Image (tube, rainbow, N blue to C red):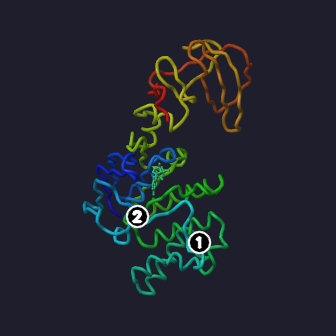
Amino acid sequence: MAEVSIEKLTKSYDGTTKVLDGVDLHINQGELVFMLGPSGCGKSTLLRILAGLVNADSGTISFDGKNIMSLPPEKRRAAMVFQNYALWPHLTVFENVAFGLRMEKHSKNEIRTRVMESLEQVRMERFAQGAVTRLSGGQQQRVALARALAVDPALLLLDEPLSNLDANLRDTMRREIKRICTERKLTALYVTHDRREALSMADRAGVMHKGKISQIGTPDEIYNHPADGFTARFLGDVNRLKDGGIRPERIKISESGGKLRATLLERAFFGDSCEWLFEVPGTGKVLVRELAAPQRELGKEYFLDYEPEFLIPVPESGDEE
Ligand code: ADP
């Protein structure tokens, strides 16, 4: 596993729009770093450049201090897991996982050992001789992950690997990928537009906006102390108050007193939480999220309170695209 350094990476496909506009990123050895951002912000482009599938216009990438920009994909040891699995339909599970190792001309025994170890790691060893086309989406993604692990990559790249899976399976795979990354001490870069995935799995996560990384930090840092309005909104709901923004779960509702007077408009019960929508005169709608769902009267006036330390930057209008 390598330590990865990316400096001043730029890329434009059409010569005008900079998809990447000076991206700097350092990934420590054994670290799972996430890059979050809306569709089209350049996440896949960043991974493809790291894998050597797309050329950057300028900038440098080094693995363990060695510049790898001029190396072809197969010499970089950056293995990629794609959203659509990208398995070979005519090969068995075993042969799919063995593919990269055969290209590297390892001995038969070595290949067998590494393929079976990788399949065990993703709990797919009993399917080794089966056809990949018979597998469910989740199983196919496990095989794709095993294929990436088998080559003992310097850097593991994951491009929205859970997006094609249904919600329950996504939760299981989220834990599995995290477990494998920890067990194997993988240096990994994972891109997604799903903040829950990033916040729950990342050692550190960055948010991409307009070709740059607007902020990078631990999930707690970027969620609770976002550097700017875009980052704040991308990671969760934010209420705009006169003195700043506040997350819905930081507001307390009471009947006796608080900073704001508010009329209760709507209640939405989600089982594990409850959301209340208030109208605050002069401020507008304010959303509050609670774990409990007590009886409250719609149309009645309540008080909302919060600790000023939880105020965060809010986007200027027009800053959210
Ligand atoms: P993301 O992964 O965040 O959705 P991408 O890196 O796929 O973003 O795309 C970033 C931008 O670059 C988008 O506007 C996309 O249309 C454009 N783009 C991506 N790949 C190509 C390509 N091969 N040729 C031209 N434009 C591309």
Which residue lies at the image location 49% right of the left edge and 48% below the top edge?
A: 40
Three-letter code, disc 1: Met
Q: Give the x, y percent position of residue 66.
A: 25, 63
Q: Residues within 10 Å of mark 1 (few under 14, many from 20)?
A: some
- The residue indicated by pointer 1 is 124
Counting other residues with Cα less than 10 Å from the Cα at mark 2, is it few (<14), some (14-19), or many (20 or more)?
few
Mark number, residue 224: none
Give the amino acid type for the residue marked by disc 2 in the picture: Leu
Where disc 1 sits, the SS reads: loop
Which residue corresponds to the image point at 31% horizontal and 68% vertical from the top-left?
A: 71
Whole-percent x and y of residue 27? 35, 53
- Residue visible at 61% across and 81% down in the picture: 129
Upstream in sequence: badge 1 or badge 2 = 2
Identify the residue under disc 2.
Answer: 53
- Mark 1 vs mark 2: in front: 2
**244 left or right, relative to 90:** left
> In this figure, what is the number of numbered marks?
2
Residue 94: x and y, percent? 55, 79
Looking at the image, which residue is at 61% across and 26% down?
287
Q: Secondary structure at mark 2?
A: loop
